[in-house]
Amino acid sequence: MQTLNQITIPVWPLEDNTIVNNVSVTYRQYGLPIGTAPVILINHSLNGDSDCMFHWDGVIGKDKSIDLSEYTVISIDIPGNEVAKEIRYDHLPFDKISARDVAVLFWLTLFELEIDELFAVIGADLGGGIAWEMTTLFPKRVLNLISIASSPITENWLVKEPIAKNEFIKSVFYSVDISRNRHHILEVAQLIKSNIHVIYVKNDSNYDKRELRRFYTKLSEVKKNVNFYELDEIEDTIYLKKNIEQVDRVVDGILEKEYVNNVA
């Protein structure tokens, strides 16, 4: 298992104007050193954490789609996901923290690591929702948004209550909404400069796929760089451990194309 690193964020402003001071954030780093390669951020899922070599086994590694000889990979833990039992988070106002707040915290962590742009941000379920929030916060700092079995608004299209590690993580998931206190969702999404790669799962019963597809179809009419992919089946969309080769093939195709077009 990769070493769990820790960094302190001095000031974390929340959506409701609450200021949280001195937040301990844990993360793991894989692949090439920061500053020497394109950076991929992997956001963990509802029941995941920053241990990508476990949760994304089959997608990340040598000669995999996320090739650690070509990229720097960062994965950040949401404070309260229970990965670091020894860190105290008693001072955090968990009842006030939204997915957008987590997206802000992730950006603050990246900035502390001297990373100001991402080749890609990837996430499934909750991780995908936070990826959407991150790209709307800084529409020009992410080249590729790769959303797997996730949505830019959770409650509008959620039809089945998901299993989550704890109630706080579930509340963050339910708070995903890139349009909140902004404009209509299509207007907000249209401003994102990233290439948007949406990966559907046929047997995913958590979302109303008809409504999601309607949204993405409308988005593709006003934004050219929106791409759709459909996986036949994933037995476990939370851990991505079964049928992971399908995810690997799709992600590999996306990253290879974008790497050749923008890096090589």
Image (cartoon, rainbow, N blue to C red):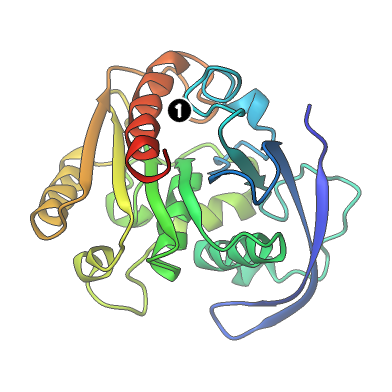
Q: Position of residue 165 (x, y in %)?
A: 64, 40
Residue 254: name its quadrant. Answer: top left
Instruction: Identify the residue at image location x=66%, y=24%.
Output: 54
Q: Is residue 220 visible?
A: yes
Element type at mark 1: loop
The amino acid on which the numbered mark 1 sits, given as a three-letter code, is Thr
Please give left or right for residue 141 compared with residue 94 in the image.
left
Q: Position of residue 90 (x, y in %)?
A: 83, 65
Total count of labels: 1
In which quadrant is the N terminus drawn? top right
Which residue lies under the disc numbered 1?
Answer: 237
Q: Measured from the top left, where is residue 79 in percent x and y?
A: 72, 56
From the top left corner, tell me how far across and down residue 239 is, in percent.
55, 27
At a point 40% along the width and 25% down the height, the residue shown is 252
Q: Is residue 95 left or right of residue 23?
A: left
Does 49 appear above or below 230? below
Vertical side of 221 occupied by 201: above or below: above
